[in-house]
Amino acid sequence: MATSVRSLAKKLGSVRVKLKIKTVFLLTKAHDQTLIGKTKDVAKWLLSKERGVPYVVYVEDTLEHNKAFDAAGILEDNPEYEGRLKYWNNELAKRKPHTFDFVVTLGGDGTVLYASWLFQSVVPPVLSFALGSLGFLTKFDFNQYQDTLTKAFRDGVTISLRLRFEGTIMRSQRRPDDVERRDLVEELEGEEGDDHRTHKPDKTFEILNDIVVDRGPNPTMSTIELFGDEEHLTTVQADGICVATPTGSTAYNLAAGGSLCHPENPVILVTAICAHTLSFRPVILPDSMVLRIGVPYDARANSWVSFDGRERVELCPGDYVTVSASRYPFANVMPPGRRSEDWINSLSRTLQWNSRQRQKAFNEWEENAGEKDADDLQTQNRAGEGHGGLT
């Protein structure tokens, strides 16, 4: 699966994809009044007969009766929009993603992450306008939205397929004949080969940034078993562990001391959060590996797992989470130009990456040093005159 997604991403990155767009999904922060006004402007612009195509525009169902959006006023002023202004909810996005041909977000990186969260299977191409505080995923200037959307719909778009992870919570099955103390390492090392049904799946999530297993409200650190494919990699004693996608390398992973990673690298980043041993260093693993992160049966306390910082679920002793490359990547629309240059610019703009005052040139330093020595000598001579000394 990881190899197939990687191959498709490489092909799409070098071509401009022309899409037949009829249905547009608009996403914004429903509690931000300024953004609601901008969403209204975009919706009216898309619905206008000047576009030449009778686009169907979906906005969040909470805007149907929102005074700032004024859906009734839009339809009253333009009766021809009737039936073309529609409303989406979480269930529609989750169950019927093929309803939408194109997604437009207005906000920051958090809004883009929310778009990923809404589409838990197939993700339509997502074009993001920068109206938030961060800008790793928001690539387009809102002031030029008319020109940007016109060119995207008419000429096509360049798409970056961002790797997503599929995380599944596996619950330990309690059996009445259990007498001996169970060992999670023995179970997971032998589960694949012997087909022992020691665990059963509970919930599955598609994530764009990271999966974090931590100690939650417990005052003591977590004990976590980490497996790669069928091998037991290590036992982690820390506040938690962060497993990040390349896109998520600039999020919690970076704050925990993990490496920056270009979003098109096919890798999994594993970083401990405040590890008990100073020798635990962040590791980068291939995206073809399947990780399992579990709470041992003899752990002192439960752990908690979160998916892109949204869903938060308690893990009891014996439970674990599988992490693997998803078959549903995130289709991020990119501006034309060199993609690596865009990523480096994002680091410099957002993180002030490696920003410092430049050293002076060597020749200039010599001249300044000579002038300083001369000034020091004159100062010493004046001091000698003032005290009757020789000059």
Image: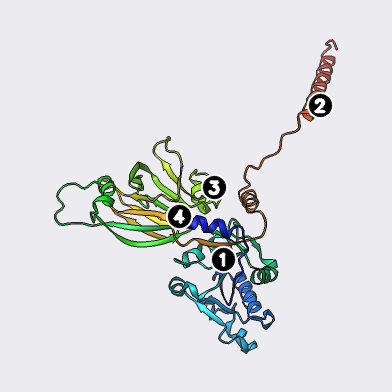
Closer to the chain start, of discs 3 and 1, is: 1
Question: Which amino acid is tagged 4?
Answer: Ala
Query: Disc 4 marks which residue?
Result: 2
Closer to the chain start, of discs 2 and 1, is: 1
Q: Residue at x 45, y 47 (%)?
A: 286
Residue at disc 3, secondary structure: loop
Is residue 353 something one can see in this rendering? yes
Is 294 on the left or on the right of 332, as rendered?
A: left
Tell me the distance, in whole angstroms, between the alpha carbons under discs 2 and 3. Answer: 42 Å
Question: Which amino acid is tagged 3?
Answer: Cys
Q: Do callouts 4 and 3 mark residues in contact (Cβ within 8 Å)?
A: no
Is 371 on the left or on the right of 265, as rendered?
A: right
- Which of the pair 38/208 is nearer the observer? 208
Tell me the distance, in whole angstroms, between the alpha carbons under discs 4 and 1. Answer: 21 Å
Classed neighbour count for the residue bearing mark 2: other residues with Cα under 10 Å, few (<14), some (14–19), many (≥20): few
Query: Disc 1 marks which residue?
Result: 126
- Which of the pair 388/210 is nearer the observer? 210
Residue at disc 1, secondary structure: strand
Tell me the distance, in whole angstroms, between the alpha carbons under discs 2 and 4. Answer: 58 Å
